[in-house]
Amino acid sequence: MKRSILCALLLSIACMANAQNKVQVTAHRGDWRNAPENSLLAFQSAAAMGVDMVELDLKKTKDGEIIIMHDATIDRTTNGKGKPGDYTWEEISKFGLKNGLGRVTSNHIPKLKEVMLVLKNTGVKVNLDKSYEYYLETYAILKETGTLKQAVFKAEVTFDELKQKYPQLIDSIIYMPVVNLDRPGAKRVIVDYLNNMKPYAFELNFTSDTSAVLADNKFITKTGAKVWINSLWASLNAGHDDDTAVEKGDLKNSWDWIIAHGATIIQTDRPGQMLKYLRSKKLHK
């Protein structure tokens, strides 16, 4: 009996250690290389390939609908012109989203509600970028659709700023602070959050890779919080980016580097290749 209990305990510990070593993958604006960015199709495609999370951006229409759009205007990504707030939902939904070649498709700008219902019960989380001004409306949509536990709110603000603006939400949402490691006091911002709430993760952005937080961020992960590092855009990761990995074939100074510096979530513009790479190293489920 004692031996069987010991074996079960060792197996449990091994499983926990294995789970802690896994790296989650976030698809930036969905699978935008194969579908229009921030479209339902892009999110469905990313989910089908096995990502853990998709990232999207929020805006509000003239009649108060929360929609998915990154830019301040719809000019670049649709065949329309102007700001989302210039249109009602009925009006803006008639525009077609453009694909990567700039061609107009039959895909429309989706509502947040549509995205959450499409991804509901898939196990794929949704990272809510550019959402800080719309937390209350977003929270209501997530409650209505039964998807509150699937969504990760984020913002580049201090804990005190978050508490002052949304005191009623702090204990009700999954939250990830965004921290610029280039700024003085970055570690203090992280520690303040850890002392006051239980963040899901910390998104760490940096143009220089010399921060002490990158050298040792176990003070974050030992609390159960994850470390999010972006592999897209060299300006967010001091050049340890997707293009270095894929176009130059230099994994040592890109994806390997990011993992070696504590990332447990990587946001990428190359989700399919990132998943293949992590699975080859047994670092993804």
Image (cartoon, rainbow, N blue to C red):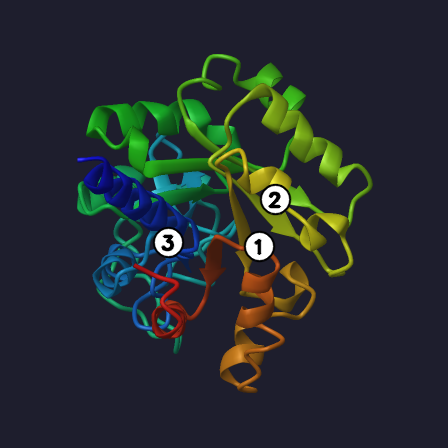
Q: Give the secondary structure at mark 2.
A: helix
The C terminus sits in image quarter: bottom left
Badge 1 amino acid: Gly
Q: Is residue 241 visible?
A: no
The quadrant in which residue 66 appears is top left
Which type of secondary structure does the marked residue at label 1 adopt? loop
Q: Which label sits on residue 262?
A: 1
Between label 1 and label 3, give the one nearer the viewer: 3
Quarter where residue 221 is shown: top right
Q: Earlier in the sequence, mark 1 or mark 3?
A: 3
Pinpoint residue 60: horizontal percent, then vertical percent. Answer: 41, 36
Q: For mark 1, does the 10 Å Cα neighbourhood hold few (<14), some (14 to 19), or many (20 or more) residues?
A: many
Q: Is residue 277 left or right of residue 165?
A: left
Instruction: Report which residue position mark 3 lands on.
Output: 18
Residue at the (34%, 65%) spot, across then down: 31
Residue that label 2 marks: 218
Marks 3 and 2, how far apart at CA: 17 Å
On the question of residue 51 being in view, the answer is yes
Q: Residues within 10 Å of mark 3 (few under 14, many from 20)?
A: some
Where does the image place residue 62, in percent across and percent down from the top left?
A: 40, 34
